[in-house]
Image (spheres, rainbow, N blue to C red):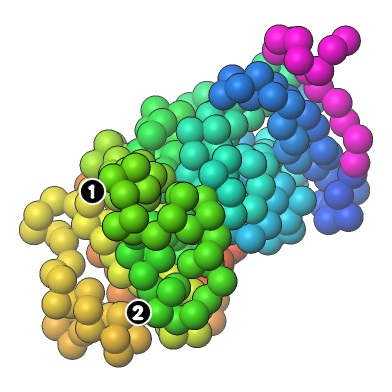
Amino acid sequence: MEWGMRVSWLFITVLSLSFQSLSGQSATEVFYLSDADDSVQPARFYAPDSDEAIPMVVALHSWSNDYKQTLHADIEVWCIEQGWAFLHPNFRGRNKTPEATGSELAVQDIVSAVDYAKRVARIDESAIYLVGTSGGGYASLLMASRHPKVWAGVSAWVPIFDLEAWYNETKKAELRYAGEIEASCGGVPGDSAQVDAEYEKRSPKAYMKDAKGVNLHINAGIRDGHDGSVPVSHSLNAFNAVALRKDRISSEEIRFFVEKAEVPVNLKTLLSDPSYGDKQPLFRQKSGKATVTIFDGDHELVSSAAIDWIQKLNARK
């Protein structure tokens, strides 16, 4: 069999993960063909033998990693213990090339990975959930807006909403991400109309309105941008893009969040959510099917909260 052939059922298992469930099962490395360019792409995948259709969680790796990352290991193990499928695609790896970083190739890779899972396992198409952190949160927002009908729910943690804004923020903070964004988009904002178009089309900001019907769970640690690399403005602006006007957070309030790493006085309420553990919510706003939560933390995922949200959402199906 030649690698370039269109063989939709291509399935090769090569590597077992070191993270295993109590049953000793784990995701394995697989390869599938991406409809983006007929290339062979890797992922990690687990699905139990089942006579009935099963839910699936798709987890997206962070900015500087690839499909072998173990950031979402707790979610993976939970899926295995629940008898759910788990999928962790590569979508062109680390975000430092034009082929990655929200490209058409990366977006289609994720869709093709889901299609692959549906071909080789009995996946409940009404119960496919997406979760991602940092660069994976960024990709999750893109997928929620570019392919909203695929997902029963999308949980995005400390995501990037606007690449141009994040470029300016990381450049000012002298973080290496600025150079990686430049390499991905072909230059710095303002270099040319073509470069500016790359920043726009790779940003969830350009499409977010199309995610208004998606169950969205957007989360950020209040100290992110101070002790982390992505200011909370990205999460708050992503929420605003799908929220009703009456539910939006004002630009002045967002500025306060970012500059002070505190909740504005007029938005403070008493909140308690056991699923966040010691990273308790400090601010939460809902509008339609979207929720944004700013919690007591920085640039991180609270796995237990993501799992709790997915589990409750699936129970209401």
On the picture, is 7 further left or further right than 52?
right
Q: Start and end of the magenta stretch?
A: 1-15
Residue at x-position 54% and y-position 44%? 98
**145 lies above or below 229:** above
User: Is residue 51 among what the camera can see?
Assistant: no
**101 lies above or below 266:** above
Q: Amino acid at mark 1?
A: Val
Give the residue pinned by disc 1: 242
Residue at x-position 33% and y-position 64%? 165
- Residue 127 position, x and y percent, is 51, 32
User: Is residue 6 among what the camera can see?
Assistant: yes
Q: Residues within 10 Å of mark 2 (few under 14, many from 20)?
A: many
Q: Give the quarter of the image for residue 223.
A: bottom left
Residue 13 colored in magenta in the image: yes
On the picture, is 10 further left or further right than 128?
right
- Residue 53 position, x and y percent, is 62, 23
- Mark 1 / mark 2, whichever is N-terminal: 1
The label nearer to you, 1 versus 2, is 1
**75 lies above or below 235:** above
Name the dominant secondary structure of the magenta segment: loop
User: Toward the viewer: 15 or 306?
Assistant: 15
